Structure formats: C-alpha cells, structure tokens
Image: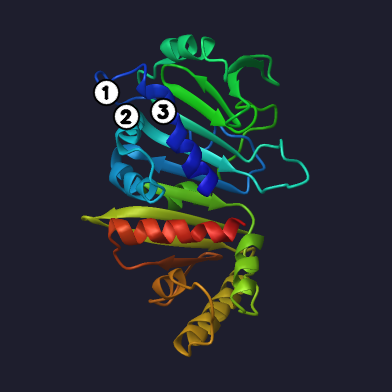
Amino acid sequence: MRRIIYFIGLIPLLFASCASLDGAGKGGSVRSEFADLPAGALLYISIDTTVAKELAGTLLARYKLNAKTMRTFFNMTNRIAAAVYPERTEEPENRRFLLIGYGKNYPSSLSAFSFFFDPAWKRTKSVTGGKYWRSSKNRLSLFIQKNKARISDADPFFAEDAAETPESFTLFSEGASVSAWLTRIEPINRALARIDLPVTIPATALFAAVFPHGKDWVIAFRMETPSLAQARGLVSVLSMVRNALAGNYIRGDTTILPMLLSEPPSIDDSAIILKSPPLPHETLAGLIDSLSIYLR
C-alpha cells in the first residue's frame, strides 16, 4: 500500500511541467474494474477519483506529497485501478505493482518530448513488443495515452491473462468510491498471529468497499467462504474476537477491529458482511494506512 501511495505521488510531477488543468474533463470509460490488469495479484484496488478526490488527497497528504501536483493528477483522472503483488526479496526486479489511471487529456505527446531530453528516462521495449519510458533511478515505468496512463515498477504491460473480477465483488462494490479485492487471506491470518490472536479466518477472499455517507464514509467488508457452514463457523470466530477485544486480551494495533465488530456480522449466502459506523475523512485515511500491515 505504501509503495502504491509513493508512486502515485510521483505521477503528477511528470505531468505538472507540461500540462494545465484546463480542459480536464470526465471520460475514460472502462469495461470492468480490473479488466486492464493481469491475473495473479495479491490485491486489486479501484478508486473513483471523481467522488473520492478529497479522501485520496487526505490519505496522500499523510505522506507529505505535494498537494498542488496531486490536484493536477486527480483533476485529469476519473478512476484509478491498481494491482499489488507480494514482495519477493530474492527477485527484486519482479513487479510489485501496476497502476492504471483513466482520464482525459493526459499530456502524452508533451510527456514523451520531456522524457526524450531527460537522461534519467530511456525508451524500453515491453514484453508485448511495444515501447514505454523507464527510469531505473526511480524504478518507475510509464506509458501515457490521451485517456489512459500505465505506471509500474516493472514492465507496465503484461503477457499474462487479464484478471477476471468475481461477480460477487462487482455486486458488493456497486456504488463504492473505493473498493478492493484481497485474493488470498493468508496476510490477514499472519496479522492476527502478530497480535497474539490464535485463530485462523476460514475465508477464500476478502472484499472491501468504501461508500459515501453524507460528509462521512462507511467501510464494508465481505469475507468469501466455500460454504454456508464455514460462514457460520467464521461468525463464531468473529464472536471470539469480539469477546477478546471486550476483555482486553488482544495486544498490538487493533484500531480497525473494534470498529468493524461494533455490530454483529451478517451472512449473505456463504459470505460474512461487516460494516463500520460513519467515519470522517481523517479517521478513514488512518485506517486505510494501518491496513497496510496486512500486506507485509
């Protein structure tokens, strides 16, 4: 999560010198949430920046990123889709993230002109045969079209199959300003072990969605399980967690747990649904930041 936030902060620095906010409009329709991303990621994220611009700005400001240049990027972008991959320390050149910005009037020609005269950027051949700009110094790769920008720490294109978004995720996240799909639950179980909670979540995937609620936001989580029986078992596990929280038996940073378990979970088919009370921007930004521990 932190690497995604860091690299988003670099994008407008490339745009700011060769584009203005004039003419930034709404466009860049897409087929589905993650159709332009490869399969196999640990985490997929979608952000509707036309609605969540202030939320995204609040989150990015926590990392002291330039507010003016961030405003430039967000005013030119309607939606962001990103894929995050688990870190492999023995293979440092492997892709850690791929981010796509959908917008209108990205300065593709002027950016290419700027990169051409910058020795830090080199034209590089993609695995698909096309060309993109690469800065080894920043470990950043970039390909800009008028209505789409691809950013990665590796090749911004891919030869793998595209990600297939689960239908249950699409239905669950409808109307959300921010949505995420954690494809494997192991990071959550490792995080629970780090706070000395001896339980294992019997889920196959985790969906998260952030919905506007007046001036505040509501977070919803959906934990997918293979069967109704396992969903009921997961409710029992969550009841144990609530009891442990009430008895102060859990150590470590558990900010998000009491918030998500403030109300009993509900069951939808073979999935568990958790919802938070309405949260202001700053609180939600802090919670999203704290969730990055689950991907370590």
Distance from label 1 to label 2 (Cα)?
6 Å
Mark 1 element type? loop
Residue displayed at 42% across by 61% down: 287
* Residue 49, x across and y down, in percent: 34, 38
Quarter of the view holding residue 200: bottom right
Image disc number at residue 21: 1
User: Is the residue marked by circle 1 packed among few (<14), some (14-19), or many (20+) residues within 10 Å?
Assistant: some
Q: Amino acid at mark 1?
A: Leu
Q: Position of residue 282 (x, y in %)?
A: 31, 58
Identity of the residue furthest to the left in this view: 214
Task: Find the distance from the CA under tag 3 to the CA under tag 2.
Answer: 9 Å
Tell me where residue 199 sits by quadrant: bottom right
Give the side of residue 195 with respect to residue 102, left or right.
right
In the image, residue 132 lies at what x, y percent? 59, 18
Q: Are discs 1 and 2 less than 8 Å apart at CB?
A: yes
- Between 280 and 226, the one lying in front of the other is 280
Q: Is residue 207 above or below residue 7?
A: below
Of tags 3 and 2, which is closer to the observer?
Answer: 3
Q: Which mark sits nearer the N-terminus, 1 or 2? A: 1
| Residue holding disc 2 | 72
Residue under the point 61% across and 38% down: 163
Q: In the rendered view of the protein, which quadrant contains the C terminus?
A: bottom right
In terms of secondary structure, where does tag 3 sit?
helix
x and y percentages locating residue 103 in the rendered image: 38, 26
Residue furthest out toward the bottom? 247
- SS at mark 2 in the image: helix
The amino acid type found where label 3 is placed reads Leu
Q: Viewer-nearest of labels 1 and 3?
A: 3
For mark 3, what is the residue?
13
